[in-house]
Image (tube, rainbow, N blue to C red):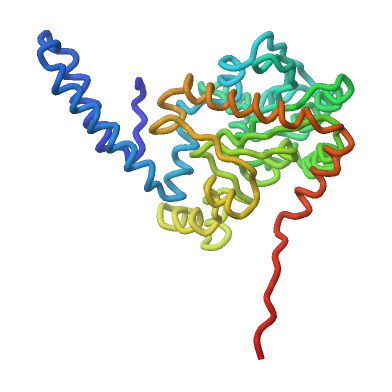
Amino acid sequence: MSSTYTMPFEEPVVELDRQIDALAARDDSDNMAEELTTLRSSRNSLLEKIYQQLTPWDTVRVARHPLRPQTADYINLICRDFRELHGDRHFGDDRSIITGLGRIGSIKVLVVGHQKGRTTQERIACHFGCAHPEGYRKALKKMRLAEKFGLPIVTFIDTPGAYPGLKAEERGQAEAIAVNLRDMSRLKTPIVSVVIGEGGSGGALGIGVADRVAMLQHAWYSVISPEGCAAILWKVANEETNTTAATALALTSKQNLQNGLIDDIIDEPLGGAHRDPQLASEQLQRYLVDTLRELGRFNPRSLVERRYEKFRKIGVYSESPTPE
């Protein structure tokens, strides 16, 4: 994998990768086939063991990996005939949210997703995936278009949160997200949302009210980022407080599934989606096609009713009476 970025818990794997690369580059590498096979098997076993024991804070690190596929990558890998749609017809075009029409498998869909960017210039232009009000208004306008033409909606969530700046607040950040929550709950067309990386706070919910909400295996989804939580509770965000906050927030895919906040977990390739974007996209496409076909059996009115009931049940619990 051509990257100089190494996560701390992956250092033993990186060392094995170096040994494998050095051995494969030797002139007599053919004679070392058995040793190479052994090394690769050891590397895969170690990688599997490490990723089975990830802490919540390590999961956040994986979700933020610079090579992790973003919305634009998945669009290129799984969408055919994609045509991007721009602007909210109110203020401007927010590059941190991509919207467009395309096909996933044989199904025509509207795709909406956060985009962080790769290069420094792209990341600045995309506000590092933190959308402004015009981004959420753009998303909703295109969703209404999809409803009009009977197209299902697929959203990819990947944001640490909505943009918190003064200009965003002046243009109605909270109102834009609130309107999205209300109107997405009423759209008479199937909606599938997938947290592909980070799912932070209202920034994620702004395009996350769906009939099915899923997470990639090593994504995170929470009311706030670990750093934000640590800064509020302990007035400082460092390795110790971030780790404690990430654990307390129950932000991993398994924890979100146990708590009833999501419906499904989509498995990632060994070592995370950044190691094999092609395989990750194939597994994502398989899930989307199967889920969209399932949701396509419901009439639009029942979809809205089921979606309402789904979100009303979140957080509901019962208490047994205390024995005398």
Q: Is residue 73 above or below residue 308?
A: above
Taking the view exactly as shown, the residue that stands out farthest to the bottom is 324
Picture quadrant where residue 99 is located: top right
Which quadrant is home to the C terminus?
bottom right
Residue 125: horizontal and vertical position, in percent? 62, 24
86 lies left or right of 125? right
Q: Residue at point 14% right, 10% down?
A: 30
Q: Residue at point 54% right, 45% down?
A: 253
Residues 298 and 287: in front is: 298
282 lies left or right of 1? right
Residue 17: horizontal and vertical position, in percent? 25, 27
Residue 133: horizontal and vertical position, in percent? 77, 34
Q: In this view, does 324 lie above or below 228?
A: below
Residues 41 and 81: in front is: 41
Q: In this view, does 232 lie above or below 112?
A: below
40 lies left or right of 148? left
Which quadrant is home to the N terminus?
top left
Q: Residue at point 75% right, 21% down?
A: 110
